[in-house]
Image: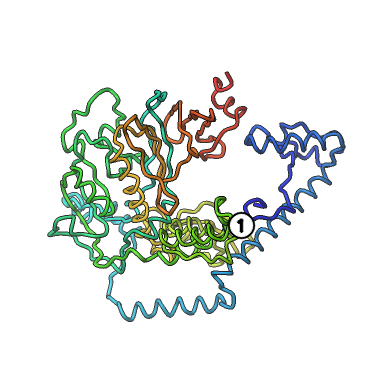
Amino acid sequence: MPKALGFTDKTKGYFPHKFSSEIHLNYVGPYPVPSDYDVDRMTVREREEFDPWYNEVSRGTFDFQKEASLYCKNDVDILTQGSLKFRDQFLVQCDMRGVTFGELHYKSEKRVSELQTTHGVRVVVMREHTWNQMKTTCTEVKEFLRCFNAPEPLNPRKALFGGRTSALKLRHTAAPDETIHYVDVTSLYPFVNSTCSYLLGHPVIIYKDFEDPRSYYGFIRATVYPPRGLLFPVLPHKSEGGKLLFTLCRTCAETNNEGGPCEHDDEGRALTGVWVTVEFIKALDVGYRVGKITEVWHFDKSSDTVFTDYIHTFLKGKQEASGYPAEATDRESREKYIRDYQEHQGILLDAGKIETNPVKRQVAKLCLNSLWGKFAQRDNLFKTTIVSDPKEFFSYMFSGKYKVEYFSVLHSNRALIRWKYTDGYVQPPGKQSNVFIAAFTTAHARLKLYSYLEKLQDRVFYIDTDSLIYLVKEGEKPLELGNYLGDLTDELDGDSIQEFAAAGPKSYAYQTRNKKKVVMRVKDPYRLRTGVLPHQQAAVYIPRAST
């Protein structure tokens, strides 16, 4: 946090957490061994900073009570200072001071009342848990369901898929006439938010008399027959186990067929799901065939500038807080930098505000990258409620509407319950979430990456959401690079890859040609994220890594 927010008078420090136990609470003596500081989990840079510190302080005496107190106080100081810096910088552009919770609540209730008055409809409501009970206890309902093959309703959240990640070649050594490039799309999701089309208003829900899918804009639930021989499938598909796949045959994917070519018929290969229409139409363009459409949510209005002002506001702040580029050293070159940025990005930077500011840059970057994810946020998370009415308590525990994680009796007439709605209960969407926007964002992002895959075809070695590693042979042109939002940037600073190896998604390694730099990235089983592993840590996960 200190480094991210730009204050240098505080450092996190180190504490031997593995040494912390009841028997050591009053310990005074030699310093605990380095392993008690969990050094095996440190990165190479963290270890380089830790070793000199430990060699210096270990000559003294370790007082557990004193060190624990200093560590905790320092932690609180860092959090306080970081929070204040973050708040001050955030309020520069998003000042919410002077607005009370009561005022926000009043405006919210007024809005709900206006919606009910303007769009009021008479609806007969049956709670879904009641319907679920009727399906198992009511003879008439059971007979109706037996004879009626009801299609699954369109759930727009099922059109929300992540990025495409795949190792397409497991090993390659570049020949003298070959170069392997590693490129990344600059701020892919902010680029999508700023430039791509998004739906507006409420959908028209269509159940029958469907037109050509290309005439719809929104969401479509359908069964499609993928083509044969397409190197890069377009439509994402979730397996029964929840794994995201890009496949041309459902059966081959679910059975993990590695024994030979697909021999299944159309029905065995068919994919059924919910997709964003922009991605669905692209699939039709490359050879997918429509088997059956069961539901469409069509939006009449759209716009490609919904988030442009938002993105430009924080992109401007981030760019100004990054300072001038290294080559802009005099007035003329700095003025040219500002002109070029306005010409290419449509944003006029304020020369008086261009200076390195880590706090402002970090806040702006956070606002740029987290926007779409907020719209994707799930509504049905665990909540905590204190109840005093026995009837309410038993409703939580036994009605079937709620899934109770735990409860605790606080008093003779008070109980705390941690709960969420069961999967069968359809909860109204939250005020901040909008899965429509989130699904369109990820679909546009996948199509952006797909545009490069179409050009490169079998020259692609590895892809991950917004980046790709690919081969260029003599006489072939590499992908065009740029310095602006949505442009490709070189991840190797002008170098290329000499040796490439991959074990699967999120697990690959390479050595560069000129600088001989070796990088290995794997999914850390402890931290559950991809990162560059230090040599010692890699040796733990992969024994041969140390040889």
Which of 10/397 is in front?
A: 10
Residue in the picture at 30% in, 45% down: 451
Residue at (28, 70) in percent of width and height: 124
- The answer, for residue 318, to whether it is visible in the render is no
Judge from the rendering whether residue 431 lies leftward or rightward of residue 443; answer left or right: right
Where on the picture, by quarter, is residue 38?
Answer: top right
Locate the C terminus and report the quarter of the image it occupies: top right
Q: Is residue 469 above or below residue 418?
A: above
* Residue 296 rendering spot, x and y as whole percentages: 22, 58
Of helix, strand and loop, which one carries label 1? Answer: loop
Q: What colour scheme was applied to this rendering of the protein?
A: rainbow
Residue at (56% x, 59% y) in the render: 363
Residue 181, picture quadrant:
top left
Residue nearest the viewer, comparing 116 with 495: 495
Going 19% across and 47% down the picture, which residue do you hit? 284
Residue on which disc 1 sits: 356
Q: Is residue 77 visible?
A: yes
Q: Is residue 187 above or below residue 177?
A: below
